Amino acid sequence: MRIIDDRREGYLEVLSTLFPHSGRAYVVGITGNPGAGKSTLVDRLIENYRASGKKVGVIAVDPTSPFTGGAILGDRIRMQRHFLDPNVFIRSLATRGHLGGLSRSAGDVIRVLDAFGCDVILVETVGVGQDELEVTRMAHTTLVIVPPGMGDDIQAIKAGILEIADVFAVNKADREGADSTVRDLEQMMSLGHEVSSVTRGHSAAGSHVKAERKAGEPWRPPVIKTVAVKNEGVADVIRACEEHRKYLETTDDGQRKALSRATEELHAIFRDALLTAAESRAKAALEDALKRSLSRTTDPYSSSAEIVRGLLAGEF
Ligand SMILES: Nc1nc2c(ncn2[C@@H]2O[C@H](COP(=O)(O)OP(=O)(O)OP(=O)(O)O)[C@@H](O)[C@H]2O)c(=O)[nH]1
Ligand SMILES: [Mg+2]
């Protein structure tokens, strides 16, 4: 695992060897504002999945952003009770490091956990940065956690987060305002879909009523109330995720998403491989270009284009 985390010599060979053993795990991305209760819910999800005998992988994207500095310690404590369970694998990932590499690193770790035989892999990421949101694109299902009483702020999260949600959990439903948050979310979603009566008239946590989706209809993200600290509504979240998984497995929409996931993954790996190879091949030419840049004899745009032409023509 260290080899992968630190990208030590040979890590690509390891991943390549693992590839045939991967592809079976179901990946759930869990995102939402800082403090929404992601880790608490993840802890409960682990508990529920373990109770049904599933092997669980967890990737906590280490929030080193100024918003949430040091929160990973809290995450560790929250999930601590699962650390000794040999069927739970918990890894954390730093958000800062190589450029745009977070999703790539997460992808690598997902591959490893998948090959280890994890049935479910939960990826917790704070839904604040683009980089973090990218990670959820690797998940089959994205669970967005919203605390109650967001009021107008729901409009604020709308832009980035609403589009990526496959399932909503209105967590901390023991607090005031959960019902209106559920209503707001549903209303927002019904702008693009037919209005349904999901959860209307039900106030207890987890009392989500399955919306009957007819064949051919697009997926409509269910909104589920949870009280993660009391394990309420968590089984409903799992049920909703399973439904979404089935939806993906049986629809054209699911096929399209699988294709786009595979495309993105291949391209990310290709870009990395290309860059590594090209930078080492063009080392001398790059040094020369740098000198010319500094002396302002050749601009970096022209030098770069020149180097790429040289590389493609096999001149280096
Ligand atoms: N009342 C109430 N509190 C909750 C619930 N779920 C979580 N909390 C509390 O909310 C706080 C934040 O929970 P976390 O699970 O750490 O939230 P998080 O989204 O992982 O936070 P970051 O990782 O820092 O973004 C903790 O004090 C939890 O105990 C809930 O259902 N009800
Ligand atoms: Mg957390």
Image (cartoon, grey):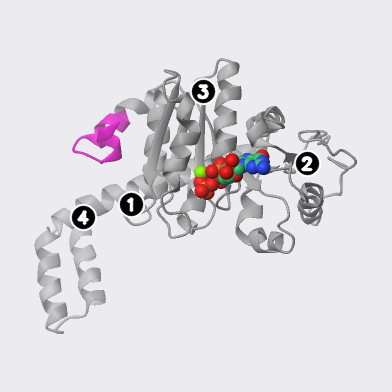
Q: Which mark is residue 271?
A: 1
Q: Of circles 3 and 2, which is in front?
A: 3
Q: Quadrant of residue 286?
A: bottom left
Q: Quadrant of ligand 1?
A: top right
| C-alpha gap between disc 1 and disc 2 | 36 Å
Instruction: Describe residue 189's horizontal placement relative to residue 117 as left or right.
Output: right
Contact, CB < 8 Å: mark 1 with mark 4?
no
| C-alpha gap between disc 3 and disc 4 | 38 Å
Vertical comparison of 234 with 85: above or below? below
Vertical comparison of 32 with 231: above or below? below
Q: Amino acid at mark 3?
A: Asp
Q: Amino acid at mark 4?
A: Ala
| C-alpha gap between disc 3 and disc 2 | 28 Å
Question: Circle 4: is it few (<14), some (14-19), or many (20+) Cα within 10 Å?
Answer: some
At horizontal 44% and vertical 36% (from top left) the residue drawn is 76
Which residue is labeled 4 in the image?
A: 278
